[in-house]
Amino acid sequence: MFAMGSAPPVFIGAEEVEKHLHRASLLLPALEAALANFSSGSAGGVAQPVRTVVPVHRHGGFLGVMPAYSAADDALTTKLVTFYEHKKDSSVPSHQATVLLFDPRNGSLKAVLDGSVITAKRTAAVSAIATKLLMPPFAEVLCILGAGVQAYSHYDIFTELFTFKEVRIWNRTKEKAVKFANSVNGPVQVCSSAQEAVTGADIIVTVTMATTPILFGDWVKPGAHINAVGASRPDWRELDDELMKNSVLFVDSRDAALTESGDVILSGAEIFAELGEVVKGTKPALPEKTTVFKSLGMAVEDAVAAKFVYDSWSAGN
Ligand SMILES: NC(=O)C1=CN([C@@H]2O[C@H](COP(=O)(O)OP(=O)(O)OC[C@H]3O[C@@H](n4cnc5c(N)ncnc54)[C@H](O)[C@@H]3O)[C@@H](O)[C@H]2O)C=CC1
Ligand SMILES: O=C([O-])C1=[NH+]CCC1
């Protein structure tokens, strides 16, 4: 129950979140600052442990608990996210999330927000930040591997921020890739194999539920930039050893990458920098090299996104 004097929390559902966060690019300034603050240690004012993940062995699922406080934003949240590898019921999304937003002054719960839209948009916005910094000059071909929720949010922000001559998609089941191409606002080439999609691409986004590699170093154009968004378990892979070892590796969080990323842990690839260090300018971006941004998703990204939505909702926008 709620303490006397504190208002009950508001519920902000998916439609309302979408209304206040209609474009992921609205989050770019706050996310850039949050990445830089996260990579500044205690001086940055971000408190964020590596996510706790509870396996639900019996049903092939996981529950992730993601708390964070950002002093710069005065945002205190925790996200609860479930992700299921083997979906028994395909009408249920593989990832479902809720964000709890607290009043940092006294710990009262202020809002319960749908976290699925937030997760889709903040993840794509962070990939866009990495891409802006790490992509080769004159990038013309975007390739997306996977055709689920994250594929759509990545397509939206990438085509808003960058101009491509060609956008390609591949998915394990072709029907989903065709559906994707038919539903987005712009021409998309559906490819029959991941290799066909990747060959010659300047920017590659991997957004699959794969647990073994779907992207091989052999196929990748030298100098390309890869946003590796899936494979968030220590024994899951999207990228092969060759690609991991022969690229310059950027991560959102070193601690998380060394705890959660099968691509990092199992390949033994060396981490060059956190993205926040590049945003701050304490590490170079090296866009002329082949670069991989290994994204695992950070709680502070959810904190700034939830605060953005709550503030907009409170202002009656
Ligand atoms: N780094 C981050 O911040 C975040 C990462 N993710 C990860 O991004 C990935 C995509 O997430 P969503 O789009 O929400 O999932 P989704 O379930 O909507 O889409 C997943 C796609 O992967 C394909 N797929 C499934 N199993 C596959 C396999 N074994 N090999 C190749 N393709 C396969 C499906 O056909 C589908 O198109 C997941 O791995 C998820 O955990 C999700 C949220 C945040
Ligand atoms: O950051 C996030 O919400 C997630 N990363 C991998 C699964 C969910």
Image: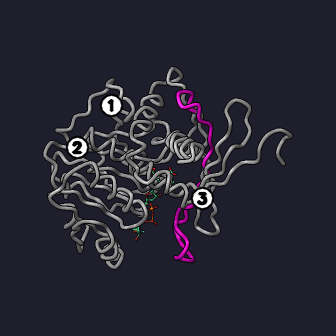
Which residue is labeled 2 in the image?
135
As rendered, which of 175 and 268 lies closer to the eye?
175
Q: Position of residue 200 (x, y in %)?
A: 14, 57
Residue 11, quarter of picture: bottom right
Q: Residues within 10 Å of mark 2 (few under 14, many from 20)?
A: many
User: Would you say residue 10 is visible in this rendering?
Assistant: yes
Rounded to the nearest angstrom, the CA distance separating label 2 from label 1 is: 13 Å
316 with respect to 238 (left or right): right
Question: Of callouts 2 and 1, which one flags the residue occurring earlier in the amino acid sequence?
Answer: 2
Asked if 30 appears above or below 210 in the picture, the reply is above
Give the extent of the magenta segment.
70-96
The reply to whether the magenta stretch includes residue 42 is: no
Tag 2 near tag 3, CB within 8 Å:
no
Which residue occupies the extreme front position in the image? Answer: 316
User: In percent of the image, x 58 and y 67: which residue is there?
Assistant: 60
140 with respect to 267 (left or right): left
* Residue depth check, mark 2 versus mark 3: number of the one nearer the observer: 3
Which residue is labeled 3 in the image?
13
User: Which numbered disc covers residue 278?
Assistant: 1
Question: Of callouts 2 and 3, which one flags the residue occurring earlier in the amino acid sequence?
Answer: 3
Q: Residues within 10 Å of mark 3 (few under 14, many from 20)?
A: some
Asked if 195 appears above or below 110 in the picture, the reply is below
* Residue depth check, mark 3 versus mark 1: number of the one nearer the observer: 3
Please state which amino acid type lies under the numbered disc 3.
Gly
As rendered, which of 206 and 129 lies closer to the eye?
129
The reply to whether the magenta stretch includes residue 90 is: yes
Rounded to the nearest angstrom, the CA distance separating label 2 from label 3 is: 35 Å
Q: Position of residue 44 (x, y in %)?
A: 50, 24
User: In percent of the image, x 36 and y 58: which residue is there?
Assistant: 238
User: Would you say residue 51 is visible in this rendering?
Assistant: no
Question: Of callouts 3 and 1, which one flags the residue occurring earlier in the amino acid sequence?
Answer: 3
